[in-house]
Every structure is written in structure tokens, then in C-alpha cells.
Image (cartoon, grey):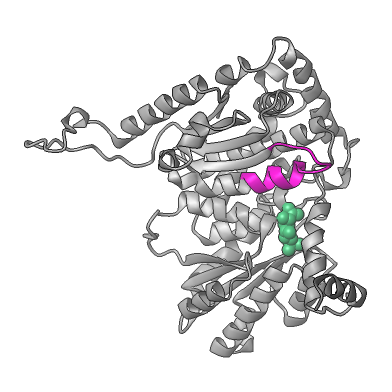
Amino acid sequence: MKICLKNAISFVPEGTMTTLAAQTQAANELLENGQGAGNDFLGWVHLPSETTEALLNDIQATADKLRAKAQIIVVAGIGGSYLGPRAVNEALDHTFGLNGNNPKVVYAGNNIGEDYLADLMELLEGKTFAIINISKSGTTTETALAFRLLKTMLEKQVGKAEAKDLIVCITDKAKGAARKVAEIEGYKTFVIPDNVGGRFSVLTPVGLLPIACAGHDIKALIQGARDMEKATGVEVAYENNPACQYAAMRNALYQFGKKIEIMANFNPKVHYFAEWWKQLYGESEGKDHKAIFPASVDLTTDLHSMGQWIQDGERSIFETVISIENPNKKVIFPKDEQNLDGLNFLAGKRVDEVNKMAELGTQLAHVDGGVPNIKISFEKVDEYNLGQFIYFFERGCGISGYMLGVNPFNQPGVEAYKKNMFALLDKPGYEEESKAIKMRLGV
Ligand code: PA5
């Protein structure tokens, strides 16, 4: 993994980076010594190096059992209990679903769309399916609603006794509704550690079990994360520490009016990584009426839609480009004797050569147009590099959030919509809120 700041640094006044480099060091120390805000949620900092072989083997054995029995595995979860495993699986799976003998992994509980759930139930009808129910709190409506529907359907299809072996719950170790249900029904469970928040949980069973179920190598993923944990540690000086450099640069750009960070990729495989990253940074930093707004584009696709805005719109943006150095497969562009499309100048080249020139051309155009550019390169899309990717952005987020002066590990703002929804649905315990909201709406 490499980070290149040379196309961003010219957008901030001289001397800025020296001050911010010192701030990254202080912020990184807070992550290490636990003296900062939200310090009861720092379990992710040394999670990769502390993950035991025994846990990885247990997860793999559970995945193998589900894989042997189920044609489809439904992962129910939302936010931090969903985006990480989906990002890894979408990156590593075959783009068009040719995944050999691996079961199909699908996702539920991340929305309340009735048509979505009806379509899912149609897909599952008559198939052997398993459910991984992921919820740290166990009270998240979207997930709980999907789980009840799926559990009811599964029990109807295979009977309660057989269903028990096809359901796994990943939740907190003691509290909450999901734990109670799992214990009463006798499901296999995994624990989300108390000190790891949802959006930092992809390297716990939350991510690892669905990733192993899809047939991917969780040990290589953890190894990548372990190596990045070392590379971004507090003892690594700013000049060699990519997480500190990233956090410093984005905070510098923010101070000088760049309020929107657009993560851009030139490889559709990493589309969901941008979704994961948006949640990680948006939910961690968007507090006290401040913080960069994390956005994303898929290129070159979106050069034909958002490209115009990026090139010429308001100059309040910067780009963080995820560059994948080598594709895993090879496609050579063919020669055509007639050359009716005039494309013979590309004959004999790999498609990736064209893509790389599009990437370079776009970078130069956007920088010329006043868009600072941070480039983050990974060698290829595999488990090891994705492990690095995950930990790099987690560490960068912790450092960046502390530099911004917020608690990166809570999410008080998420409660507002829930309170209104429960009041509108007359949830027991919300009687006062129900009365107030109905009065406000005049119903
Ligand atoms: O990052 C977070 O903490 C949130 O996005 C949660 O992961 C999300 O709200 C789901 O919560 P839970 O796992 O309790 O169902």
C-alpha cells in the first residue's frame, strides 16, 4: 500500500503540514494510551494482532458447516453490522456471480423495503438457506424485522430443529434481545467485543463469518490488517506512517475550504469499499456541526455523470483515489482488420493499460481544475490487500477524528430518526413522544 500526497500538498499554504504532522502524532498517541474521547471503544486498535488462531478456526469451522448445508446464506445486518462484509465479498466474488460451488451470499436487514424483502423471500422459496443475524444491540429495527421474517420462513421450510443449525447470531456478549433469542433457541453465537463499535467491527466475526462463508481467506485478510497495524502504529514516524499522512492531509484541506472528500475508484470491484468508508468517516466525524462530507464515485463510469461537476463545479472538493495497481485477470484488446471503429491503436494492449491512462488523464485534469488529489494505491484486490485497506482507513479515521476534536466513536445523531419512527409506530414506551409527534403533524 502506498500513499501519494504530491497533488494535494500544493493546495495548502506552506508550513501547514508541519503543524498538522505534529497533531497526528498526538492523536495517534491518544488511540494508543486511551486518554481521548470515546476511549471505551478502542478495542479495534489492536484487534488484528490480538485475534487468536482459535477464533479464526472456530469461525472457519462454522462457515464450513453452513457452506456444506446451504445454497444461499442471508446476512442480516445494517450499518457497521453489514457494510464491511459486503465490501469484502463484493470485491472478491466473481462480478457476475460465477462463484463455483460457493453458496450465494445475500444481504437483508439493511433497509425496510417491502418489495426488497418480498423478492428475497421469493429467491429463498424452496431453497436450503442459512441466516447470519448480526446486531450488536439486538434492537435495530431493520435487522430485527428481517430476522423475524427469515426465521419464520426457515422454520416453516425445514422445521424448528433443523433451522437451529442453520442460524448463527453475532451480537454482544451479554445484553440485548439478539443474545436472549440465541440462547433460548440454542443458536451458535459469536461475540462482538464491547469495546468495538459497529463501524470498526469488520475484522471481528461480524465481517469474518460472512467472508468465510463466501469462500474467502480470512487468515490472509487478518494478516494484511496486522501488517497495517504495525505500519501505522504510534512508534512509526509521520514520514513513514500512511494513516498519519492521510489524516493530516484531509484535515489540512478541510481547514482551507475543501469540505467534501470524494473517494474515487477505477475498479468496480471496490465500489462497496467506498460505501463502507463513507459510513466509517461520516458516522465517526460528522458531529458538532463540523466535518468533511464523505462522497464517492465509480470511474470511469461517473466521469459521464458527476465528472462535469468534479471538473467545473464549486471548488469545495478534493479526491481520494483508490488505485489498484494490478488486475487479477488479463484481457487483451483484439486487432480488427477492417478497423471500422478506429480502435486498432489499442490492439494488443491490456484493457488495464487503457484504464490506467484514463486514471492518469483524469487525475491531471481534475488537479488542473482545482481539485486536490490524494492517491492511495494497493497492489491488487485480494484478501491481504483488503485487510490492509480496512485497517489503514480505520486508523486514519481515529486519528482524523481526534484531530477534528470530536468523539469518533459515538453516534448520537442516529437516534433522532429512530425516536420519531417509534413514536409514529406507537412502540410501547414511546407514549409521550407519540402524543407530541401526532400533535405536531395534526393527526
Ligand atoms: O457503526 C455503528 O455503530 C452503527 O452503524 C451500527 O453498526 C448500526 O447502527 C447497527 O447496529 P447494531 O449492530 O446494534 O444492530
Specify whether residue 327 is in view: yes
- Can you say whether 98 is above or below 87 in the image? below
248 vs 105, left or right, is right
Q: Is residue 141 above or below residue 360?
A: below
Q: With respect to residue 252, does 291 lie above or below?
A: below
Q: Quadrant of the N terminus?
A: top right
Residue 44 shows up from this direction = no
Residue 301, how many percent across, how many down?
A: 41, 43
Where is residue 221, by image quadrant? top right
Where is residue 42 drawn, in percent x and y?
81, 43
Q: Is residue 303 left or right of residue 251?
A: left
- Residue 418's x, y, as percent? 78, 65
User: Magenta stretch?
Assistant: 277-292
Who is closer to the viewer here, 89 or 165? 89
* Figure quadrant, ligand 1: bottom right
- The image position of residue 176, as x and y in percent, is 82, 69
- Splitting the image into 4 quarters, where does residue 159 fall? bottom right
